[in-house]
Amino acid sequence: MTGRRLGLVAGLVVLLVLAGVGGRSLLASRSATATDAASVSASISPTSSASSSATGPSASQPGAAAQSRSSAALELAADDLLTLAPRPLSRGVTISGSLKAVNSAVLKAKVAGELLELLPREGDRVAAGQLLGRIDASDAELRLRQAEHNVEAAQAQVDLAHRQLDNNRALVGQGYISATALDNSVASHNGARANLQVAQSGADIARKAVGDTRLISPITGQVAQRLAQPGERLPVDARVIEIVDLSRIELEAALAPQDAGALRLGATARLEVEGVSEPVAARIARINPVTQAGTRAVLVYLALQPTPAQARALRSGLFARGSVELGRSNLPALPVSAVHVDESKPYVLMFEAGTLVRRTVVLGERGNSPGSNDEWVEIRSGVNVGARVLSGAVGTVPSGTPARLPTPAAVVPLAGPAGGPSAAR
């Protein structure tokens, strides 16, 4: 059995070796046949092959390069380019702060006691002299009664001293008493009168304390907040209610000394106020002569001049910002967003001959332009008037980037508000 198995294994090995030799021979013959066919084809048309190889790649290279450059160009919309042109700029100082009522008052308790009632609520209108609430007057009334009794006792002493003085004057005339006894009577009478005046003053103080238990509004306005509730026991000077008069509102703004020095009383301003759709007119009413400790800021107060519709929307504490106009001038300018400041010197991206090129610029004055909500800046040098500049909406693009417009007339020059096309964004 073992000999048969060895014979079978040897036979299989021989068959596998023969099969490998035959496969190699077949592959070699096929390769030789393909080589012969290629040589024959080359010998038949050498000229056509050479010409096709010569014309194919060389002819397709310029077209492919042009197509590659065209596909890499940045597509610009009509409002992606701005034209540098003179515009009227209103120069000013930017201000911001909170609105506050010119007249406001915090009513405080002048006497200690329990708050019995507080009539108005937040938002209610009150008039000057109106009764707003009451504090328990029991203690004050008892002190007043005590003071009045003291007045009565002092008055009795004065009457007694007055009769004694009259009697002593008669006795001195008859020689029954000495002049010294008369002088003592005069002094006693004067002392009694002084005690009466002290008692009357005490009664007046007690009477005022009774009156102070009635809470009276000092100004006309609206209740801003109730700082105490009925049932609370109030100490002296406890805050009870706050009243504001919204008929006169002003903006309190803190400015740097160099900015405040350029302002003058009566200068006009336009303010953007929270909750008010239209700008509110204002003027500088006062400038604080003393700087704030620590910050060295100067407080400037602007009196608001709202329309009736705006006045209904104004509230004390609202945030407002705007600018005080210092003058106007016609200057070549661009929106601040179109000027890049991510390097040491500001620059713009100018569209020139189908390419966006970086140009360093020198900036000048800043201001607002009529008909535009953007802030504008003067371009003093670096770019000539009429140059087309990439707007800030596109973002930062590397210098030398190819760009193209849909049509040659796609860019609309920026014009002033007097006429012409509207400003591109």
Image: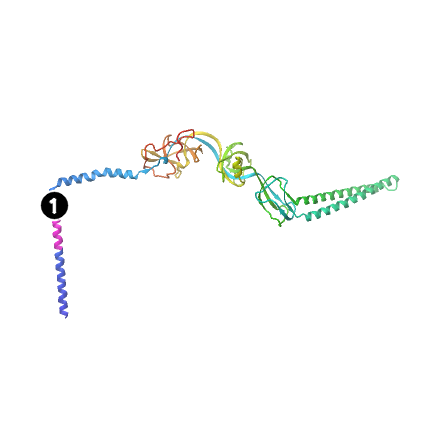
Residue 18 falls left or right of residue 191: left
Check if residue 275 falls in the magenta segment: no
Residue 126 falls left or right of residue 199: left
> In the image, what residue occupies the spot 22% across and 39% down?
60
> In the image, what residue occupies the spot 11% across and 52% down?
29
Residue type at mark 1? Ser
Which corner quadrant holds the N terminus? Answer: bottom left
Q: Where residue 173 sits in the image (x, y, percent)? A: 87, 39
By secondary structure, the bulk of the magenta-drawn segment is best described as: helix
Q: Where residue 70 sits in the image (x, y, percent)? A: 28, 38
User: For numbered disc 1, what is the local secondary structure?
Assistant: helix
Q: Which residue is mark 1?
A: 39
Query: Closest to the observer: 90 or 381?
Result: 90
Check if residue 30 falls in the magenta segment: yes
Query: Closest to the observer: 48 or 340?
Result: 48
What residue span does the magenta drawing correspond to?
24-34
Q: Where residue 356 sits in the image (x, y, percent)? A: 33, 36
> In the image, what residue occupies the spot 16% across and 39% down?
51
